[in-house]
Image (tube, rainbow, N blue to C red):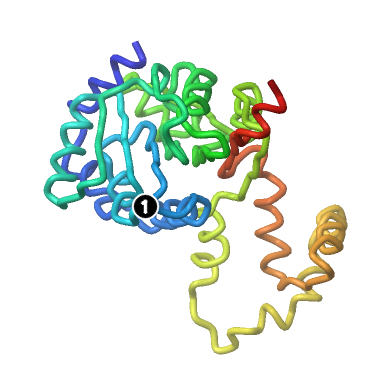
C-alpha cells in the first residue's frame, strides 16, 4: 500500500506550499544549502541530469536554470501535473517530466548524473531503485543521494506522517546507501557530512555578533584541551594527512563530530565505472 499512499498523498497535500518550495518552507535556508552542495558535486552543465522522486519539480527547475538538461520523474501524477505547470510558467525548455516509479525505470546509459534528494527513503525497495539509477547513467557518471540518516523513521514528524498518510519512511544512512551502490556496480564513493547540519553548527550556532569576533579562535588551545582525548587523537591523525594545518576550536568540536558520524548521516556521491573500467571488469 505504500506506493498507492504516496500517490494519494499528492492529492491531499498543500499544493501551493509543495510547488513553491524551498521558499514556502520554514527550512528554506537549509534546503538551499543542501541543494547548493549538490551543485558543487555535479558534473558541469549542460550535463544530462535525472532527478529521481522529484515531487513538484522544484529541484528539477533549479537544475534546469543552472543549464542542465533535466528529466524529473515521480510516481504521483498530481506531482508531475504541478511540476509541468510550474515549468511552463517559468519558460524552462530543457526540462521534461515523466510519471514513473523510480524502481521500474527503463533508462539505459542516458544520463551524466542522477540525484536522489529526500526521495530514496520513500522507496519500497531501495536496492532496486539504486540499481535502476546505475543503469540510467552513462559509464563514468555519478549518482548523488542526500537522504535522512539514522533516527529519521522514529522522529515525531515522521511517525505523524506515517500515521496520517501511510507513506513509506525509512532511515537511509550513508553506510546502507554505499553498500547498495556497491551491489549495483558503483565502484567509487565519497561521503560528506550533511551540509545543513554543518551550517547549523558553524553558522547558526555562532550567529550572535560579539565584541571580540576572534575570541574563540584565540582561545583554541584552551578549548581544544577540553576535547576528549580520543577525538584529539583522531584529529591529530587527520592533520598528518592535511599537512599539519591547524584548525580553530569550533572545527575541532563540531566538524570533526559530523565527520565521525558520516556512516550514520551524510551525503553520498557514487561513481559508475567508465567504459574502459567496465570492459576490464567484463
Quarter of image, res 252: bottom right
Dot 1 alpha-carbon crowd within 10 angstroms: few under 14, some 14 to 19, many 20 or more: few
Residue depicted at 47% across the width and 22% down the height: 132
In the rendering, at what x and y percent does residue 207 appear?
A: 49, 72
Looking at the rendered structure, the secondary structure element under dot 1 is loop
Quarter of image, res 239: bottom right
Determine whether, in the image, residue 88 is placed left or right of residue 135: left
Residue depicted at 49% across the width and 50% down the height: 42
Q: Quadrant of the C terminus?
A: top right
Residue at far top of view: 1
Q: Quadrant of the N terminus?
A: top left
Asked if 232 appears above or below 88 in the picture, the reply is: below
Residue depicted at 58% across the width and 44% down the height: 266
Return the residue nearer the eye: 47 or 204: 47
Return the residue nearer the eye: 149 or 281: 281
In the rendering, at what x and y percent does residue 214 appear?
A: 63, 84
Residue labelled with disc 1: 27
Amino acid at each position: 500500500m505504500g506506493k498507492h499512499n504516496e500517490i494519494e498523498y499528492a492529492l491531499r497535500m498543500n499544493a501551493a506550499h509543495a510547488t513553491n518550495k524551498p521558499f514556502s518552507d520554514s527550512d528554506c535556508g537549509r534546503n538551499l544549502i543542501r541543494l547548493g552542495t549538490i551543485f558543487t558535486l555535479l558534473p558541469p552543465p549542460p550535463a544530462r541530469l535525472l532527478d529521481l522522486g522529484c515531487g513538484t519539480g522544484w529541484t528539477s527547475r533549479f537544475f534546469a536554470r543552472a543549464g542542465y538538461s533535466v528529466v524529473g520523474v515521480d510516481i504521483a501524477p498530481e506531482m508531475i501535473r504541478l511540476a509541468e505547470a510550474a515549468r511552463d510558467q517559468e519558460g524552462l525548455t530543457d526540462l521534461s517530466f515523466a510519471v514513473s516509479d523510480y524502481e521500474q525505470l527503463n533508462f539505459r546509459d542516458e544520463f551524466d548524473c542522477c540525484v536522489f534528494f529526500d526521495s530514496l527513503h520513500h522507496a519500497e525497495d531501495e536496492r532496486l531503485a539504486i540499481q535502476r539509477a546505475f543503469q540510467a547513467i552513462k559509464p563514468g557518471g555519478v549518482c548523488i543521494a542526500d537522504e535522512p540518516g539514522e533516527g529519521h523513521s522514529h522522529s515525531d514528524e515522521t511517525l505523524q506522517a506515517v500515521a496520517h498518510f501511510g507513506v513509506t519512511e525509512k532511515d537511509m544512512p550513508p553506510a546502507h546507501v554505499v553498500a547498495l551502490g556497491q551491489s549495483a556496480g558503483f565502484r567509487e564513493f565519497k561521503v560528506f557530512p550533511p551540509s545543513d547540519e554543518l551550517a547549523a553548527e558553524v553558522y547558526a550556532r555562532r550567529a550572535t555578533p560579539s565584541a571580540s569576533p576572534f575570541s574563540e579562535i584565540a582561545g583554541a588551545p584552551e578549548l581544544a584541551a577540553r576535547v576528549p582525548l580520543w577525538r584529539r587523537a583522531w584529529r591529530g591523525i587527520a592533520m598528518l594527512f592535511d599537512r599539519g594545518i591547524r584548525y580553530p576550536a569550533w572545527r575541532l568540536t563540531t566538524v570533526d563530530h559530523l565527520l565521525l558520524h558520516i556512516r550514520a548521516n551524510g551525503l553520498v556521491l557514487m561513481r559508475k565505472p567508465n567504459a574502459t573500467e567496465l570492459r576490464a571488469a567484463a
